[in-house]
Amino acid sequence: MATSTSAKRRGAKAAKGWRTAAGSDRHELYEESVQSPEEEVAFIDRVFRSLRGRAPASLREDFCGTHLLSAAWVRRRATNRAVGFDLHAPTLAWGRSRRARDLTAAQLRRLEIRKGDVRTARSEPVDTLAAFNFSYYLFKRRSDLIAYFRHARTQLKRDGVMFVDCYGGHESFSEQTEERDLDGFTYQWQTERYDPVTGDVLNHIHFVFPDGSRIRKAFTYDWRLWTIPEIRECLAEAGFRRTHVYWEGTIHSTGEGDGVFRRTTVGEACAGWIAYIAAEK
């Protein structure tokens, strides 16, 4: 599947008219340009059912940020509950304010957001645990990544499943800027630096507006660019019994991703790709 590594998700919500840097909120722009929570909770639901033969009810969202995924989870079914963890208090506060407008009182009662370190934070055992938007790439050492996965495993129920996303392709290792035009603004993904010796990568998100104004370095990510085999090996060493890779299909007329992720044992040598891994406890 050939796609741009700048686009974490295929779609974007409709913008609310003309935008400028001064009048825009970076968290709102991020949600609109990068996230598709309804699609992701549907994916989690489908895969969990296929692996466990029942519907999942509880979700833990690590690195939850504005907890958009958790909000989509509690909206999906009246029996669903979600708990989210993140260390950045201002982002959590922004999310609480926005979710209070998006969710009903009943849905908010089934959503719990806490400030905490995902490596140590404890919650009631859940059916599913999601670490999305590549946030766990901040663990650059193998031992640190395994330690995080090992702790995450303890937070799952006996038949729980952990979900992570990952990205790659030869463009991911190139120092370049890619962009995607959305309604009212342009999203830019810049790889400022990649070190082939350490695997370290420094990425930025910029937003550009029709009047020429910009929000430079709205978000910066100092990561290690992990590969799928490395991630699966770390999950196995952390104690997960089995892992499965879900690869995106292709719209053959355009060469773009079709948004449908299917389990596979073989990928494609694309310029850029996004995949999910499901890890069974």
Image: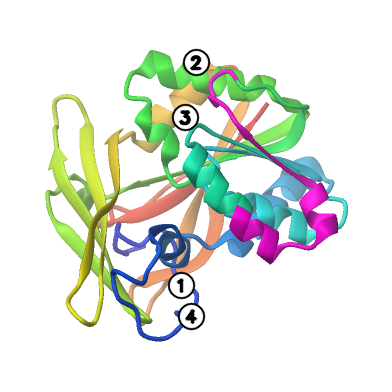
Residue identified by numbered label 3? 232
> Residue visible at 33% across and 34% down?
226
Asked which secondary structure carries label 2, the reply is helix
Looking at the picture, which amino acid does disc 3 mark?
Arg
Secondary element under disc 3, as helix, strand or loop, is helix
| Residue 224 shows up from this direction | no
**Magenta includes 9?**
no
State yes or no: residue 119 in magenta: yes
Q: Quadrant of residue 105?
A: bottom right
Amino acid found under the numbered disc labelled 1: Ala
Label 2 to label 1, Cα distance in Å? 34 Å
Residue 12, label in figure: 1
| Residue 213 locus on image (x, y percent) | 20, 72
Query: Which mark's residue is nearer the viewer, 4 or 2?
Result: 4
- Cα–Cα gap, marks 2 and 3: 14 Å
Q: Are marks 4 and 2 in contact (CB under 8 Å)?
A: no
**CA gap, disc 3 to disc 1?**
30 Å
Label 4, on which residue? 14
Write the start and end of the magenta stretch as one range: 97-120
Does dot 4 land on a helix, a strand or a loop? loop
Which residue is tagged 2? 147
